Image: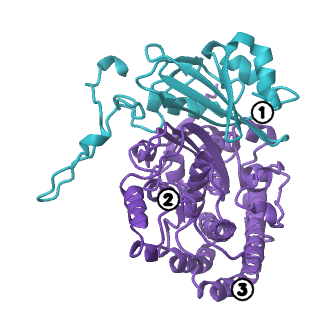
Chain colours: A purple, B cyan
Amino acid sequence: MIQRETLTINMGPQHPSTHGVLRLILELEGEVVVSCRPVIGYLHTGIEKEMEFRTYHQNITLVDRIEYLSSYHEEFAYCLAVEKLLGIEVPKRAQYIRVIMAELNRISSHLVWLGTSALDLNVTSLLMYCFRDREEILELSEMVSGQRMMPGYFRIGGVQEDLPEEFFPRVRAFLDEFPRRLDEYEALLTENLVWRQRNEGVAVLRPEDAVRYGVTGPVLRACGIPYDVRKAFPYSSYEDFEFDVPVGQHGDAYDRYLVRMEEMRQARRIILQALDRLPDGPVLVEDRKVALPPRRELVRSMEAVIHQFKLVSEGIHPPKGEVYAAVESPRGEKGYYIVSDGSNRPVRVRVRSPSFSNLQALPVMVQGGMLADVVVAIASIDIVLGDVDR
Amino acid sequence: MADLAPVQVFLQERLGEGVLEVHRFRGDPTVLVRPERILDALAAVKEDPWRFEMLTDLTAWDRYPTEPRFEVVYHLLSLSRRERLRVKTRVSASDPVLPTAIPLFAGANWFERELWDLFGIRFVGHPDLTRILMPDDWEGHPLRKDYPLTEEPVEFRGYAPKVPSQTIPHVPPRRREDR
């Protein structure tokens, strides 16, 4: 009599294809995955706890570190939540600037995904190409905020400073060049036989499973469900811009690839519209109880000094209540749930992270598939472990 | 209360005494239900015509020292109707137990493990209620308000770890049965 036995192997937490510190306990029968149990928490930093001890402004620095590949979205969601709590309206120019920076960030985040997931399938040259383009976006970010990553650029009530003059020609030059570059990458991959064989029909997620697990972002849209926070619950003037939400059909790794490639083109479209129609005006609310007074006022007005002092030392006091605000980050719905008791520190800040929910559906994607396809599955959900573990 | 969302009115009618409070703050519809009716509430709004079929988020916060101490918050989303709903319930510190929502939303699995890990709220019927973010042998539940935020000592010469005492108002000794 032949006995059938399964083999349990451990993948990670230090494994190049896990894109961070993710550990998988895989049960195999031959090369077929019978069960998969992700073990997370290796990058848990306790940011949610830390935020309860900081003022609302200080927390902007912390939230950047959660999803480090798309910090602008992180700040975006946090600031939207606090602004909703305060009930303030951000000036139109600041809203547009936020959209520009967030969409640039979406492109750079997707480029990292494209480069690394291609690297997992041994397309090594693409990583260099992608990082070359991403470098340009990081430099734009440095020009605007002073930081390449973790910018700390958004403020509660607007953004820290207006866009510099030299930003505009440079971003336009990048956006003019970018479609040609994308075409090149697609020429490398889209019809590539190896790429298609490794991605098509791999890591399939059915739409009903995606909904059951709370999957959002490109992974959900690749299943054919056109849910995008920017369209469903428009924030920060997204309703002003014309853009399409790409949707897949099969819910496999290949559709996720197609969806993200198209999202980069759509992001470019949004940035161009925002640049063309960028309204004039302030970039920060005038309310002195919320936003710091401009530097030049400090030497003339005692009142401004007092406001500055109160805001820096004590911070803002939002009303008592609870809010949830979400943005569409490159990975899905990034939401902040903030509970305030009326003091200058939040009682609770909950980060609803898309990577956490998307990763939870990983066992469904890989069960019954080959061990080698687990690598493709992880790459195709595009998790950031900082976002999973917070 | 004229500005209630239709789903809030529906839940009030469906659950009657089970609904403790309804309000809308900044447009977010919120329903607070009794802990024993929480699954009824979630199941009721998952059906037609409400179709809140996705559990976007499940979290909690500590109301220490008020009782009931923990407020557990379910954020629901209707993909087809593009609407959000927040359903909340409260559990006491002495017996923080809730039924699991996994049969309704498979995604609740990890969220509930996280709540057990960070708050010590138990979910009856959960197949694998183990720690998820903290190490397996960790003591205590870090997101509770009586769990101190401390600074790890770093070995530098002349460095004294500064624990801002004003941010830690009340630090009772950790009890063994909190595990």
The answer for which chain carries disc 2 is A
A6 to A63, vertically: above or below? above
Q: Quadrant of residue A273?
A: bottom right
The residue under label 2 is which amino acid type? Asp
Res. A333 visible in picture:
no
Q: Residues within 10 Å of mark 2 (few under 14, many from 20)?
A: many
Q: Are marks 2 and 1 on the same chain?
A: no
The residue under label 3 is which amino acid type? Glu
The answer for which chain carries disc 3 is A
Residue A64 disc label: 2
Q: Percent x, y for residue B18?
A: 69, 13
- In this view, the residue farthest toward the top is B17
The residue under label 1 is which amino acid type? Asp
Res. A259 visible in picture:
yes
A93 to A239, vertically: above or below? below
Residue A177 disc label: 3
Frontmost residue, A8 versus B73: B73
Q: Residue at x 53, y 62 (%)?
A: A155
